[in-house]
Amino acid sequence: MKAELEAIQAEALAALEDVNSLDTLESLRIAYFGRKGKLTDVMKGMGKLSNEERPIIGKLANEVRAALTEAFEATKNALDNQQQEQQLEAESIDITLPGRKPAYGKAHPVMQTLERIQAIFTQMGFQVVTGPEVETEHYNFDALNTPSDHPARDLHDTFYLTDGHLLRTHNSPVQIRVMENQKPPVRIIVPGKAYRVDYDVSHTPMFHQVEGLLVDRHVTFSELKGVLVSFARQMFGDQTQMRFRPHFFPFTEPSAEVDISCTICHGKGCRSCGHTGWIEILGAGAVDPEVFRAVNYDPEEVTGFAFGMGVERIANLQFRIPDIRTFYENDLRFLKQF
Amino acid sequence: MNVTLNWLKAYIDFDFSPSELAERLTMLGIEVESVKQLGAGLEGVVVGKVDSIRPHPNADKLVLCQVDIGEVNALQIVCGAPNVCEGMFAPVATIGTKLPTGIIIKRAKLRDEESHGMLCSEKELGISDEAAGLMELSSDLSIGTPLTEALGLDDVIFELEITPNRPDCFSMIGVAREIRAETGNDLKLPQVDLQESEADIQERTSVTIDASDLCPRYAARVIRGVKIGESPAWLKQRLESIGVGVINNIVDITNFVLMEYGQPLHAFDYHKLSENRIVVRRAAEGEQITTLDEEERDLTPDMLVIADAEKPVALAGIMGGYDSEITETTCDVLLESANFQPSSVRATAKALGIHTEASYRFERGADPEAVIPALDRAAQLIVELAGGTICKGTIDVYPGKKEPYQIQLRAERVNFILGTELEATEIEQILSRLGFGVEVGQSEDIYQVTVPSFRADITREIDLIEEIARVHGYDNIPTTLPKGDIPIPTPNTSIEVHKRTKHFLLGTGMMESVNYSFNHPNCFDKIRLAADNPLRQALQLKNPLSPEMSVLRTTLLPSLLNNAQHNHNHQIDNIALFELSTVFIQREEPARVAGILAGEIGGGVYGSPYRSPDFFDVKGAVEGILDVCGITDYTFKKTEDPTFHPGRNAEVLLGNRRIGMLGEAHPKVLENYELPYKAYLFELDLEALADAADFSKRFEPIPIYPSVLRDLAIVVDEDMQSDMPIEIIYSTGGELVESVRLFDVYVGDQVPEGKKSLAYTITYHSATETLTDKAVNDLHDKVVKRLNQELGAELRM
């Protein structure tokens, strides 16, 4: 009987070697462990053994059974793994098929730029204020120290309405409206649309400006520089250089035009900056005492500065669109690029 | 305005390189827009003399020239120009020269004959378009001189942008004064030493000013016996280098002095002035003048003219008259140097549409004290270059003479405004270099500053502070951050509503568009606004760029429909756009948000196909906007708005307040915008949203007890609104109904004709206990019963 058990074990282990599916494994299991299985048969014969033999053979039988059970289990695991691997392989997909991107819209490129500018000044404590686009001569010019025969009016080609009003040529009228209604300190920015009679590759009749105004008991020109340098570094990068050139605006004194180092050549000189290394981005200056008088502020009691920049121009430093009128065609092929 | 390096150096010494000068001027506030080297590319071109010519043995049209360029051996040059002749002086491009036209001169063989350079035409040198023959040079030039030097082309042109407040810089001397501020070097003004004749000017002419308010000063000299002719080379070179046309010696001199001093001058033919005298007066009604450009001009009584005894002979400060101009036969000249009131010149120039070098300067303000120096300088040059004698004396009528302007300047205020720590001595030095008189005033740090006559723009202390700042250098002013308190901002619901609306719409996949505020007046017809719709009352532009941009928009819908049309015309048909903008309704500028969905929306790729939008896409967009604004008590109501499909539109109501519209565009509107597919539109009043917005959210406990879901499909009349069953479900279930969601609407074979099936998911939930099946079933049965009783709804099995 001992020989018989050992033979069964050898035979079963050999048979397991050839098993390659869970079905054959199951048949084999029944052939050995089933009710009429070979091992079961042998176990049934145990009763006929002598008392001396029984524990010896019993022990051996249990060992064979344990060994075979373990071998069957191992084979089953191997087959299970193999089957899962096959299934995974069958489930493989073409990962170059497009992702199911949720539809998402994009803000207009000019608005993206305007919002960035706004965010930078908001962090510096400037409050966003808006005002009317249809204006009077008073707010657009006179209160800003630009009387009607002033040559500076030539710089603004103004759209007039048939009712005598005009479309603001800059956002500065809002400064006047705010100061008329508020005591200093004032720290505002005015984003919004402005209008000039101009239509070519670098001008649109409607454009966007962000103007800023800071008025307090003692505001200096050096603080104007500080605010704008801080803006430029955040907007155009840490390494950006800034240059303040004396200029003339009727509503500021001293006035400056402000350049940044060319965003393309970083100051070395290229076609974009006319080989100067500099690109003009905004106008600024200390608020002219006449402007303070127009809003009943005492220029001996308060000082301030103002600045204004064209959003399309700044947007285009980044986007480099050859004809900025493209901004307002709202061609979806264009809008989707930004 | 253009200035040149050499011309400036005639008035002040400086060592700046051209680029350095450009940088310095720019940083003084005189922006240099371009720097151009005259004669660039002509470095290897020299003056040559053709010594001898012999025929080319192998070519009929070519000759062999021996050309002297001042070296030991003459060069053999092959030439084909028709005008080449022995003894001629002509420019020679030597071997290695790269001409401005791109030609590189190499040793060459032309039909077997060696050529060691090229004799050049003006075109080949890039000087002009003249290509018919060699450029002939004057035979008094010295052979071998570089051509640039010989022709005065070794100069640099600076194109300056002068701001309107600085008329004093519209002259060489004016710009030289700015260089003085930079260097501290003295000005070298022209030395004038007039030799006057015995003949007294007082006996030969007179000047009467009848409009002293418009003419503060008028001075004249008379020069007799001049000979009109060509100007000498140096004068022509000066004028041509800055782009001023050359006419004759007298006119060229007046132009030269104009550029030198910034003082416009005018030369009259003395004998063409009636009674040989000058009257400065306003034009009479109906008077006319033919100006130098041979245009006849109608004058009005607000225009200032220079007249003789009878008639106007010049437009004051703008342009001379044709009949009294200098001609070849002129022998006696009356030379005018005057000062006119800026706004008068400006108004007249504008009214007549004439803009000249003279009007440009007078409009901005010329220096009345430059009148005499410029007059004398021009008189001297005339005698030097055109001969003649100067009558004794000057007529100088000066009713507008003013005392020099004085301003008090507080040194402490300079630093207060600029944030600098300038010493008193630095301030004094800057001001004196600019030509200001500086004296210590009543106390030690208060100066009494005298403004020179050429700086009429300086009238206040702040103007002086700007002068100090720009000469000190803006770059030398420290950079600091504001020290003041940050004002407490006031909350602004509109901005928040704007932001949330935008973020929501972007999240739905719509792209943001930005359109001009202008529209074509026919847009109201195109969107079929009723004749009495107040939105038709659009503000009109007086000077529009085009009809398409002639009224201000009162609604955003036409712009978005235009955008759809533009895109469709470019084969882009997945249109999902919105815009946030103000509109112009009479004196109000309310903000709106509007959107359009048309063509196909969706990703348009495998797995996310395109689909046609419908009414419920725009409705969903509007509901979403209301939701992010925290607005819940809104309703939708069908209207008869002609812009929309009569059965597929809704106005949005908050109580009785209409806050917007949405729906399918009327087929006629689609036709008007040539759209071949349906378009869905919405427009909401952002101000109304801001008024109603509620951002105050409160925590609600997360349910502890489980919810029970029951689906319910009922068959009702087809025209029943889907929200009627929902109201009944809520009212029946009370607090135990947490939510009702419509998930299907079906019309077709499975339901009887005239009926539709609505399918809802009802969520039952109690905040205090776990609902038993029985409790839910009882409640659900009650719901079904009431739906049947009140709406005739049948359960769909």
Image (cartoon, rainbow, N blue to C red):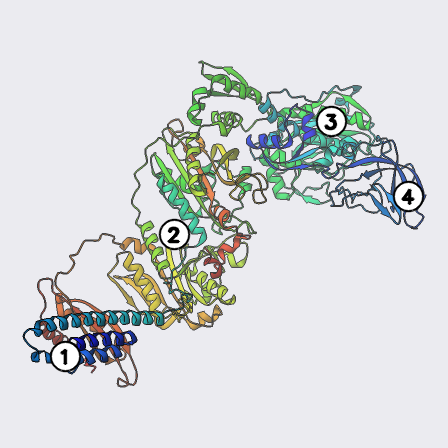
How far across and down, in percent of the image, does residue B295 sit? 71, 45
Q: Looking at the image, is B471 positioned above or below residue A212? A: above
How far across and down, in percent of the image, does residue B292 sit? 73, 40
Mark 3 vs 2, N-terminal side: 3
In this rendering, the label closer to the viewer, 2 or 4: 4
Disc 2 is placed on an element classified as: loop
**Marks 3 and 4 on same chain:** yes
Q: Amino acid at mark 4?
A: Leu
- For residue B407, which numbered disc appears in the image? none
User: Gap in Å between the C-alphas at discs 3 and 4?
Assistant: 49 Å
Q: Chain of mark 1?
A: A
User: Gap in Å between the C-alphas at discs 4 and 1?
Assistant: 129 Å
Mark 3 vs 4, N-terminal side: 4
- For residue A42, which numbered disc appears in the image? 1
Q: Which residue is mark 3?
A: B378
Q: Amino acid at mark 3?
A: Ala
How far across and down, in percent of the image, does residue B332 sit? 80, 29
Q: Which residue is mark 2?
A: B588
In the figure, residue B146 lies in which quadrant?
A: top right
- For residue B64, which numbered disc appears in the image? 4
Residue nearest the viewer, comparing A1 with B784: A1
